Image (cartoon, coloured by chain):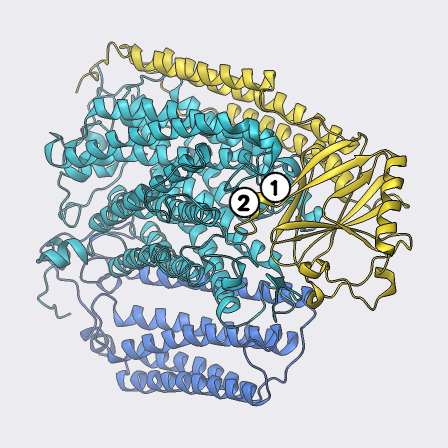
Amino acid sequence: MSSHASPVHHSEAPKGWLRHYIFSLDHKIIGTQYILLGLSAVTIGVILSIMMRIHLAWPNAHIWGFSNGVVSPEDYLRVITMHGTLMVFFVLTTVPQSGFGNYFLPLQIGAPDMAFPRINMLSFWFTFVALIVLLSSAFVRGGAPISGWTAYAPLSAIGQIAGPGEGLGQTLWVISIALFCGASLMSAINFLGTTIDLRTKGLSLMRMPLTVWAWFITACVALMAFAVLLAACILLLLDRLAMTSFFIPSGEMVSGVLLKHAGGSPLLWQHLFWFFGHPEVYIAILPGMGIISHVLSTFSRKPVFGYKAMVLSLSVIGFMSFMVWGHHMFVSGMSPYSGLAFSILTLVIGVPSAIKTFNWLGTLWGARIQFTAAMLFAIGFVSVFVTGGLSGIFLAQPALDLYLHDTYYVIGHFHLIMGVAAIFAMFAATYYWFPKMFGRMMSETLGKIHFWMTFVGIYCIFMPMHYLGYAGDPRRYASIESVHYLFRLQPVYVFISIAAFITAAAQLFFYFNFFWSIKHGKPAEQNPWHATTLEWSVPTPVPHDNFAGHYPTVYRGPYEYSVPGVADDFVPQDLAPELVAKAG
Amino acid sequence: MGSRKSCAGSAAPAVMMAIVILALVGSTLYFHIAKTWWFPPAITPVGHRIDHQFLITFIVTGIVFVLAQLTLAWMVFKYRDHGQKVRFVRGSHMLEVVWTSATLVIFVSLGVMAAHAWGEVHFGGPAPGALQVEVTGAQFVWTFRYPGPDHKFGRVIPKDIDASIGNPLGLDPNDPAGKDDIVVPDMYLPVNRTIELMIRSQDVIHSFFVRELRIKQDAVPGLVIPIHFTVTKIGDYEITCNQLCGLGHYHMHAMLHVLSDAGFHQWEQKQEALNAQ
Amino acid sequence: MPHTAATEELVIIEAGGGARPPFRDGGDGGDSSSHSRSGMPQRMYVTGITVAMAGILMFFMAFVSAFIVRKGVGSDWHAFPLPRILWLNTFILLASSATIVRARQFFGRGDREGFRHWWMVTSILGLLFLAGQLIAWRQMVASGFYLATNASSSFFYVLTAAHGLHLLGGILALLYVGRGKLTHLTLATATEVASLYWHFMDGLWIFLFLLLWLGR
C-alpha cells in the first residue's frame, strides 16, 4: 500500500484567533462557549425573575425599563414567558449536556475529540442564533410573546389578535425554538456517535463514569424528543402564517373577530408539546444526576453505591420519560381513562428516581466526607431532589391535581427539581472541573459562602410556594387584586421576593469567584481532588487533542476509591495493575 | 500516597447542614400541621374524598420526607472526615430489591387509591335529573347559561357573539329552544342536587376552578367538556381562571352562589321573568 | 489487483508518527481502511447516520401522529385527488434505490467507472423525483387544493415538503461523495453511509405515500 505523507493533523491547535476561539472545532472550546452562553442566558433569566418578584410583592413599584415604569399585565406575561423559555432551553438543556458534556465526555472516554467536530461547532452556532432570535422578540413591535414557555394553542396560534406580543414576537419565539431543536438534534447525534464508537481500549460500558452514562441516555432522549418538538413548531408556524388549522378549531370568536380557521385541535398541540416537554425535563436533570453521583463518590472517597442500579435507573428514567407526558394534561379535556394510565406510569417513573436517592445516601454511608464547595452542592442536591421529587407524588395523582394544577404548588415543584437541583448540579460541576478547565482553583471560601446563602435562600423562596398552592393561588397571574381569597397571601409574596433578592445577590459570589479565579486562582495540580476518571489523567491546560498521542487504556471501573489492600485511597482508571501500590 | 489529609475541624459544615435541614423539616411540619395557608373546607362529597386522599399522601410523603432529610443530615454528620477508615462497599443487591419493591408498592398504591376520587368526577355520567349548566369562557369573562323551563339549550352561532348587544354567547335568535335560556355572569346552584357543567370556550383555553368544589377543568375551544358533582354547603365561592389565556387572565373572575332549594327556585323564576321582558 | 486499485484513493493512515487512538476495536496496527487520517474509526460515521435516521424517523412520526389525531378530531377532513404523477415519482425513487445498490456493487469490485456512472444515475433519478414532486404540487393547486384548504391537503404539503427537503440533503450528499474528494471519511464508508440514508428516504417515502393515498 502506498502511504501518503500526512501528519496526524489533529494534534495542533488552529492558528488565528477566529479559528481558535470563535469558530473552533475543539470540543473543549465549544463546551466553554456553551457554558458562557448558558451563563448569559441565566443572568437575563434571573434579572427577569427579579422583576417578577418586585412586581408581585409591590404591584405599584416602578421598575426601570418598562413603559411608564409600571409593569402592565402584558409586560408581566412577557417576562414570565421569556424567563421560562430562557431558563428551560438555554440554561437547563444547554449547560449540563452541551456545556459540560461536550467538554468532558471525550476526556472521560479517552477520545481526542467528539466524533463530529464540525457538526459540534454548527450546533453551538445554531444555539447562539436561536438565542439572538429569542431575545430579539422583546424588541419588535408588540414585544415578546405572552403565552408562557408552553405556548398553548390557540393563544399562541391565532396571531396578533390573541394579545400583545402574539404577532411577530410569538413567531420569532417559534423560530428560535425550531433552531434550538436543530441544534439539539445535531448535538445528540454527536454524543451518541462519540460514546458508542470512540471509547478507548478497556472502557467497556460498565466501566464508564456515571456522567458518561447520563450524557449518553440524555442524548438518546433528546434525539427523540426534539424531533417531535421541531415537527410541532413547524405546524404551529403554519397555523400562524399560512392559515392552516392544525391547532385552531372552528368558530373562534376573538375580540369580536370571527376567525376562518376550522377543525383543528388545541389538545393536539399539548400532546405534541408535552411528548417533548416531559422528556425535556429529564434531559435537564439526568446529566445533573450523573454529575452528583460522580462528585459524591469523589468526596466520599467511596465507590458509588450500586453502580449497576444507577445505570439501570438512568436507563429506565430515560425510557419511561416518553410514557408520562399526559400528567401535564389531566385537566386538559383529555380522556380521563388516559389520565389514569398516565398517572400510574408517572408514579412508576418516580421509583428509579427514588432508587437513585437511596443509592446516593448509600454512597455517603460509611464515607469519609470532604466538604469542598462541589461536595456541598452535591449534598444540597440530594436534599432538594428529595423535596422536589416528593411533591411530584401529589401532582401525579389526577384527583389531587384537580386542585393543584396550574397553581403555585406546581411552580414550587418544578423549580425545586429543575431550577434548583439541576442548577446545584451545574454548580457542583463547575467547582469540580474548574481546575481542569482553567488550571486554577476557585476560592473554596467564596464557594462555601455561595453555597450556604443559596441553599437557605432557595428553600425560603420555593417552599412557601407550595403553601400558596394549597391556598389555591393560580399561576401566571399578573396581580392578585381581583380574587379575594388571594389577598391574605400578600405577606408570603413579600417574603418570597426578599428571599429571592438575597439569593440572587448571593450568586454574585459565584460570578466573581468564577471570573476572578480564571486569572488569579491558586494554580491547580493535575489531579487536585485525587479522582479516578480519565479527565484527571491529562495535564492542565489540556492539550489540543486531549491525550497528546498517549491514549490511555482503562483497567477498571470509574469509582475505585478506598479499595481495601491498596495503599492510596484512589486508583485511577488508567493505572496499569502492576503499578498499583499495595498497602502494608 | 498515604492517607488523604484529614479535614479535621470539618464538623462545621456538617453541623450547618444539620441545622438547615432541621429548620427545613421543622418549618415544613409546622406549616402543614398549623395549616397556616391551607385549602378551604370542601363543599362536595367528592371534595371530601379528595381531601382524604390528600391526607394519606401527606402522611406517606411526610414520613419519607422527614426520614430522608434527617438521614441525609445524620450521614453527613456521622461520616464527615475525622480521620476514620472508609467502610468500603460497592452496593447491596438485597437492599436494592427491598427499597425498589417498597417504593413501587407505595407509589402505585397511592395512585390506585386516588383513582376512586378521580372516577367519581370523571367516569360515568351524572345522575339523571341533574341540573345542567353551561359554562363559557372567553377573553376575559365567564358566562353561565341555564336551559330554562324547556330544559333545552338553544343553538349558539359564533358569528352572532356580541356582548355589546347583550348576546355574549351568540344565541341563535331563530332557535325557539334558546328563547328561555338564562344567561348570567355569575353561577347559581341549588344545594344537594347533582350538577352537570358543560364547559366550553369561545377563543383560547381557559380553566374553570372553584377551590371549595375541588373541581378544575380546562375550557377548550372546539370541545364541550362535561363534569359533574353535588354541592352540600350553601355559600358564596370564587371562580377563577386557571389556564393562561392572555393579558386579562388574572381578572377573569366570577362568583358561585350556592343557594337553598327554595332560594334557587326563586332565583330561577326571577330570571325567567326577566327573560320574558 | 482490484484491491490495490481500490485502495489507492482511500485515505491512508500514516504508518509511524503520532500514535493513533487505540479505540476498542483493536487499536493500532488494525485494518487501516477502518480508520481515517486522524485515527478515528470509520464506523462512527455509520453510527452517526443511523442515529440521525432514528431522529428523522421520529420527526416524521410526529407529523404522522398529528395526521391521525387531526383526522379523527376535525370535521373538515375531505379527500383530495392524489396527483397522478406521484405513482411515477415513487417508481423513480424505487429505481434509484436499485441503481445505488448497483453502484456499490461496482465499487466493491473496484470498478471505479461503473461506480461513478451508477452513482450519477442515482443522483439524477433523485433530482427527477424532486422535480416530479414539484409537479405534483402544481397538480394539487390545479385541482384547487392549497396548503390551507383543509387539514388533509395541509398534511399533503407538509409531509411531501419535509420528505423532499430531506431527500435534497441526500442528493447533495450523493453529489459530494461522487466527487470523491473526502477528507475524513473513506470512500467506502461514505458510500455506505450515503446509501443507508438513501434507502431510508426511499422506504420513508413508500410509507408516506401509502399514508397519503389510503388516509387522505
Relative to residue A210, is residue B96 drawn left or right?
Answer: right
Upstream in the sequence, badge 1 or badge 2? 2
Q: Which residue shows up at 37% across the image and 64% down it?
A: C49
Q: Is residue A91 visible?
A: yes
Q: Is residue A576 left or right of residue A163?
A: left
* Residue situated in front as seen by the camera: C9 or B18: B18
The residue shown at (44%, 25%) is: A495
Reply above or below: C94 against C158.
below
Q: Which mark is residue A354?
A: none
- Can residue A204 be spotted in the picture? no
Residue linked to disc 2 = A320
| The one of A492 and B164 positioned closer to us in this rendering | B164
Colour in which chain A is drawn = cyan
Chain identifier for the blue-coloured part of the image? C
Q: Quadrant of the N terminus of chain C?
A: bottom left
Quadrant position of the C terminus of chain C in the picture: bottom right
Residue A91 occupies which quadrant of the picture? top left
Along the line of sight, the residue nearer the viewer: C84 or B131: B131
Label 2 CA crowd tier, 10 Å (few <14, some 14–19, many 20+): some
Quadrant of res A252:
bottom right
Residue A25 percent coordinates (x, y): 20, 56
Name the secondary structure under disc 2: helix
The location of residue A359, given as percent across then percent down, is: 45, 27
Residue A345 badge: 1
Q: Which chain is rendered yellow in the image?
A: B
Q: Chain of mark 1?
A: A
Q: Position of residue A263 (x, y in %)?
A: 65, 67
The amino acid pointed to by label 2 is Met
Instruction: State the CA–CA distance, disc 1 to disc 2.
Output: 8 Å
